[in-house]
């Protein structure tokens, strides 16, 4: 495992991290806490030191899993968690799938949320504290950014950032977080199949000379770039991919077949997808969806496999530029995708 350090900070993270949405939410299959803790500890044994949770994942369950897994080695691991959703609201326990809870970014609420996260994590500080699915109102809120700086000075957090999702999009939220706020950490969806708007946000960081490190979620395009789907693939009843249109599966498989050149006898497509992301120096860590031990070992060893060549990178770029030769409906985005919408 290799490690990268966030700009202007001492926060050092493993290039491959672990997102706890797969162990705590039930959206990717059910796992007991014992199963989750065993998987987290195995990840640590493989060199993974960065773990990304959220108070809303399982209504605090992801944070509690981290405390149980690493309470005896807190100083050796890096915790990220998120805030902004009211998990105490009356419909929190009835939430299904990715139904969105009410948000609250007021200073009093943020402080209460942080204290609750610290209790669940059984720690005195959070390494990276992230606005969860921030809108433009939060990006433009001076008081919120000042509060994060206050929490940093108080030693409650080491650094902070913005986590964008769940759908791909949120173009100007990300651009303004980088350009206007010089945001220390930006978590985005970005992968070889889904490069918009990540390309624009990373390019903006260079243009603005921002000290932003990027955290990448969904690096395998919801499993597509693992290379295992077929036309006959059926997702489990509680798997969020089951509710996607069939065209997503059919077109995705066609695109993946054109990327098979990235596979080698000693490098899987899933490992190549991680390497493609880590070619970007501003990417600090990649958060693959981890379901089981075999997959964990595959992803954790991605950087030990042969490196992608310049020709590999160029070929992926060319395929993406023509959408892999596939004519499909434009994607529906969330977030602010047009500048005139910002000032509407």
Image (cartoon, rainbow, N blue to C red):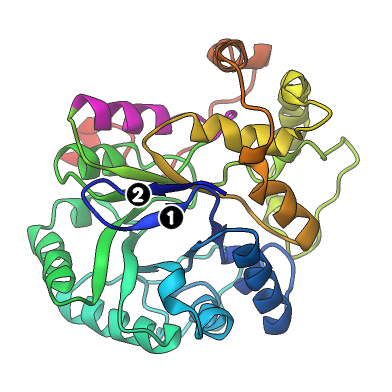
* In the image, residue 198 lies in the stretch drawn in magenta: yes
* In the image, residue 285 lies in the stretch drawn in magenta: no
Position of residue 80 in the picture relative to residue 141 (left or right):
right
Asked whether residue 333 is in view, the answer is: yes
Q: Which residue is mark 2?
A: 5
Q: Nearer the viewer, residue 102 or 78?
A: 78
Position of residue 136 in the picture relative to residue 262 (left or right):
left
Position of residue 281 in the picture relative to residue 166 (left or right):
left
User: The magenta stretch spans which residues?
Assistant: 191-207
Q: Which residue is mark 1?
A: 13
Q: Quadrant of residue 339?
A: top left
Residue 276 image position (x, y, % from top left): 56, 29
Residue 42 image position (x, y, % from top left): 68, 68
Q: Nearer the viewer, residue 309 or 187?
A: 309
Position of residue 332 in the picture relative to residue 96 (left or right):
left
Crowd band around label 1 with a 10 angstrom C-alpha radius: few (<14), some (14–19), many (20+): many
Crowd band around label 2 with a 10 angstrom C-alpha radius: few (<14), some (14–19), many (20+): some
């Amino acid at each position: 495992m290799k490690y990268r350090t966030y700009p202007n900070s001492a926060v050092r993270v493993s290039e491959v991290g672990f997102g706890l949405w797969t162990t705590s939410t039930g959206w990717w299959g059910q796992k007991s806490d014992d199963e989750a803790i065993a998987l987290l500890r195995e990840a640590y044994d493989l060199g993974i030191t960065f773990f990304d949770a959220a108070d809303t994942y399982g209504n605090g369950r992801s944070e509690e899993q981290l405390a149980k897994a690493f309470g005896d080695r807190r100083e050796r691991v890096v915790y990220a968690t998120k805030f902004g959703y009211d998990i105490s609201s009356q419909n929190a326990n009835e939430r299904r799938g990715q139904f969105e809870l009410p948000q609250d970014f007021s200073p009093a609420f943020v402080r209460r949320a942080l204290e609750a996260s610290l209790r669940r994590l059984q720690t005195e500080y959070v390494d990276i504290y992230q606005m969860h699915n921030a809108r433009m109102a939060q990006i433009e809120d001076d008081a919120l950014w000042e509060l994060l700086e206050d929490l940093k000075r108080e030693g409650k957090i080491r650094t902070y950032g913005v986590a964008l999702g769940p759908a791909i999009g949120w173009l100007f939220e990300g651009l303004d977080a980088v350009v206007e706020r010089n945001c220390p950490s930006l978590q985005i969806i970005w992968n070889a199949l889904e490069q918009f708007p990540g390309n624009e946000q990373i390019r903006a960081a260079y243009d603005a000379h921002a000290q932003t490190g990027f955290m990448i979620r969904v690096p395998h395009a919801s499993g597509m770039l693992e290379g295992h789907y077929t036309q006959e693939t059926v997702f489990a009843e509680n798997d969020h991919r089951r509710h996607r249109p069939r065209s997503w599966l059919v077109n995705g498989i066609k695109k993946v077949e054109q990327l098979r050149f990235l596979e080698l006898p000693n490098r899987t497509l899933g490992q190549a997808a991680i390497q493609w992301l880590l070619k970007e120096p501003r990417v600090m860590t990649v958060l693959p969806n981890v379901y089981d031990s075999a997959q964990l070992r595959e992803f954790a060893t991605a950087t030990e496999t042969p490196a992608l060549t310049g020709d590999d990178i160029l070929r992926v770029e060319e395929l993406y530029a023509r959408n892999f030769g596939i004519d499909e409906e434009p994607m529906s985005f969330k977030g602010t995708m047009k500048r005139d919408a910002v000032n509407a």
